[in-house]
Image (tube, rainbow, N blue to C red):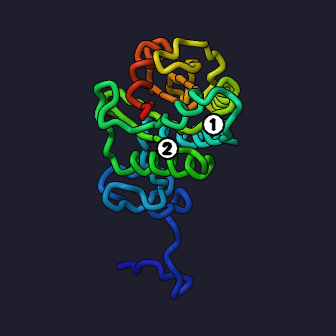
Amino acid sequence: MSQPPSNPHPGSYPPPQQGGYQPPQQPQYGGDYQQGPQQPQYGGAQLGAPVPPKKSGVGKILLIVLAVVLVLCVGGGIAAWVFTKDTVDDVVTATKTRVVEPTTLGGRPKITDSQIQSTAAQMKSQLASDVPKASSTAGAFYGDLTKKDLVMIAGVSGVIADPKKELDDAAAAITPSLATNNFKTVDAGPLGGDAKCSDGKASGEPVAVCLWADRGSLGMVVLYFKSAAELQSQFVSLRGEVEKQD
């Protein structure tokens, strides 16, 4: 009986089979293997994959934007509070003017969300700092964010030498940030003074802005997600809830 051929190179591996070198098979992970490197799985997420940031509500983004705008606008607009040579009655009336934060505004409840309240408190604090001679300050939010029904008020009171100039300065200051470039004069209501309203936009969302100024106060009403025409129809009554005379 013939003997199998001996290995001419003892200790070496047998020669490869025909067809050339065969690479080792890639390991399988619970199904058909997909070409390319795979990240280890941990709870359904790939290790090292970027985690998308939590999205804040549009309303809260707007709050931050407008809070900053208001500080620049109202605080910068009333740089000096001085008594003038006008009639004593005008001065007396101005000194009796106050701005307040009603429990409700136009039937809307005051928002009690801690973050929103914190924003309002910072706004009021900045107003008081910028206008140290102000007799009162106001800053609050009303409505329901989930229903896109949100109103913000901000204002200061004191004796204003030139209300029309302060109103124009406030309108000019807010325009770059909110694109409120179409301010139109509107009825100021029984409290007198001057008032203007404009459409605007913040973070891609529509906002409506109305400003007023008289001898005793300068203030702003902002209606989110709405037009200036919608705010104008409410402005006089909303202002009447915020501006008071002792």
Which residue is label 1 attached to? 73
Crowding around mark 1 (Cα neighbors within 10 Å: few <14, some 14 to 19, many 20+) is many
Q: x, y percentage for residue 196?
A: 58, 18
Q: Of 83 and 29, which appears nearest the observer? A: 83
The secondary structure type at the circle numbered 1 is helix
Crowding around mark 2 (Cα neighbors within 10 Å: few <14, some 14 to 19, many 20+) is some
Q: Of 226 and 48, which appears nearest the observer? A: 226
As drawn, 1 above or below 115: below
Q: x, y percentage for residue 167?
A: 64, 26
Which residue is rendered at x = 70% and y = 26% of the image? 165
The secondary structure type at the circle numbered 2 is strand
As drawn, 104 above or below 135: above
Which residue is rendered at x = 34% and y = 36% of the image? 102
Which residue is label 2 attached to? 136
Q: x, y percentage for residue 84?
A: 69, 34
Q: x, y percentage for residue 246?
A: 42, 35
Q: Label 1 is placed on what type of residue?
A: Cys
Q: Label 2 is placed on what type of residue?
A: Ser
Q: Give whichever of discs 1 and 2 has the lower sequence position.
A: 1
**Quadrant in which residue 182 is drawn:** top right
Labels 1, 2: front one? 2
Q: Is residue 51 visible?
A: yes
Which residue is rendered at x = 52% and y = 59% of the image? 18
Q: Residue furthest front?
A: 88
Q: Is residue 219 visible?
A: no
Which residue is rendered at x = 59% and y = 19% of the image? 194
**Could you tell whether 154 is left or right of 167 in the image?**
left
